[in-house]
Image (cartoon, rainbow, N blue to C red):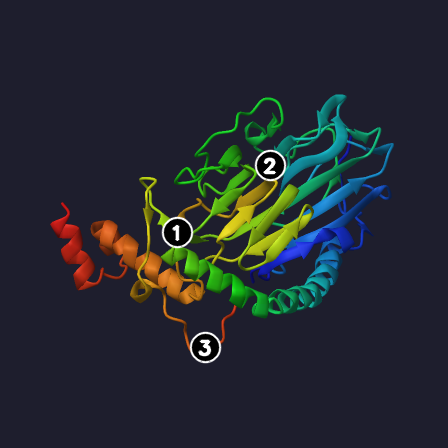
Amino acid sequence: MARPHIERYDLRAAPWRRVTLLGCARGLDGQVLSVDPASGAASLRLRLARGLTRPGGYGDAELELYVLAGAIELGGARHGAGSYLCVPPGVALPPLASPRGAELLAFSNGGPPGFTASDSDHPSAARDGLIALDAAGALRWEAGGGYPAARPGRLVKVLRSAPGSRALSCLIALAPQYRHEAIGYHDCATESYLIAGDYWSLQAGACAAGSYAWRPPWVNQGPARSERGALLFLRSDAELAEHLHLNPWSTPAENRARAASRLASARPALCAALGGRRAPRRARTRARASR
Amino acid sequence: MKPTRRPRREALAWLRAESALQRRRARALAAATEALAPRRERWIEAFLAGLESPGVEQEDGTRRRLPAEELPPRPRRRPRVVY
């Protein structure tokens, strides 16, 4: 079962509740952004109290962390605002401390968040998958990033492209007076959290910092704009492909059929090999004519 | 240090509780999004008017004005945003 479609969840008014699954009996509060009822995979915003400590240990699920504000210390190493960590399942983190408090985004992939106190990795852990980045200082903004096409006024910092699925975790910066005139959709699920600035889309209207969205594949997104500029954290569950069109009323089924038809036109042999549909005769003729 | 695994049932209880909360929350959020429909109609009108003039930007940076007959037809079904 997938997560429900959320266009705009303004977390400023959402309640905070104690989170004990991550190994802290107290001092850790959270807001659940979304959760997959089948697998338990979850996206959360966490608030670490000043002076919080936790022993070293690992989780059963992969965990991605992004520091929104404040700082955490892992084994004495400081990770301030803008830091990103991806911790594979079973990889033990050193003792955690939050001397002055912190606010994080946390994404538990493949299962619910969990914690097992340990000073060593689980025997099956893949430690070479551990990522720790200072996204604020050490990464450059790029025009294309993980997107298939650059767009004026949009810059990307790729934090992670998952091996195999190429699921993307990235930061997106939109310039002030950003405009995207077309309507887009993806053939994968995406979720985004507006860290700062403002964002408007035809579907959700005006979104303020602290707004969250989870969109299933094929749903329309945009046109969109930002007046003062925006900083977003974006994740996808597969390689991010962008399909653009101009129909504000199209349904996910229509978008999926359109994308399949375009792919069949552009890659007929591949689609045939996959046992997929053939392109419409008109598209096949056009494809041959353009060779 | 000997690993001390937290009970699995705690995670399952958490998941059940959060899934129930999410169902209620998602219904409310979807209703709030769909309630924007009257305003969204105006936004769509402005969007379609913009396709006619000043037009839509092409990949080469030029603008193309769409004639009225190329604009997407309004469907008979009730427009929907949240699926």
In the picture of the structure, the residue carrying the numbered disc 1 is B54
x and y, in percent, of residue A12 in the image: 75, 51
Residue A167 vertical placement versus B29 (above, below): above
Residue at the front extreme, as displayed? B53
x and y, in percent, of residue B69 in the image: 30, 66
* Total marks placed: 3
Residue A110 vertical placement versus A70 (above, below): below
Circle 2: element type: loop
3 or 1: mark nearer the eye: 1
In the picture of the structure, the residue carrying the numbered disc 2 is A88
To which chain does the residue with label 1 belong?
A: B
Task: Give the residue at x 82% y 41%.
Answer: A24
To which chain does the residue with label 3 belong?
A: B
Label 1 neighbour load within 10 Å: few <14, some 14-19, many 20+: few
Which amino acid does the dot numbered 1 rest on? Pro
Q: CA distance from mark 3 to mark 1?
A: 29 Å
Circle 3: element type: loop
In the rendered structure, the answer to whether residue A254 lies left or right of residue A220 reads: left
Which amino acid does the dot numbered 3 rest on? Arg
Task: Give the residue at x 46% y 52%.
Answer: A188
In the picture of the structure, the residue carrying the numbered disc 3 is B77
Q: Looking at the image, tell me whether mark 3 or mark 1 is earlier in sequence order.
A: 1
x and y, in percent, of residue A197 in the image: 64, 41
Which amino acid does the dot numbered 2 rest on? Pro
**Marks 1 & 2 on one chain:** no
* Numbered badge on residue A224: none
User: Can residue B16 be seen here?
Assistant: yes
x and y, in percent, of residue B9 in the image: 75, 56
Q: CA distance from mark 1 to mark 2?
A: 49 Å
Label 3 neighbour load within 10 Å: few <14, some 14-19, many 20+: few
To which chain does the residue with label 2 belong?
A: A
Circle 1: element type: loop
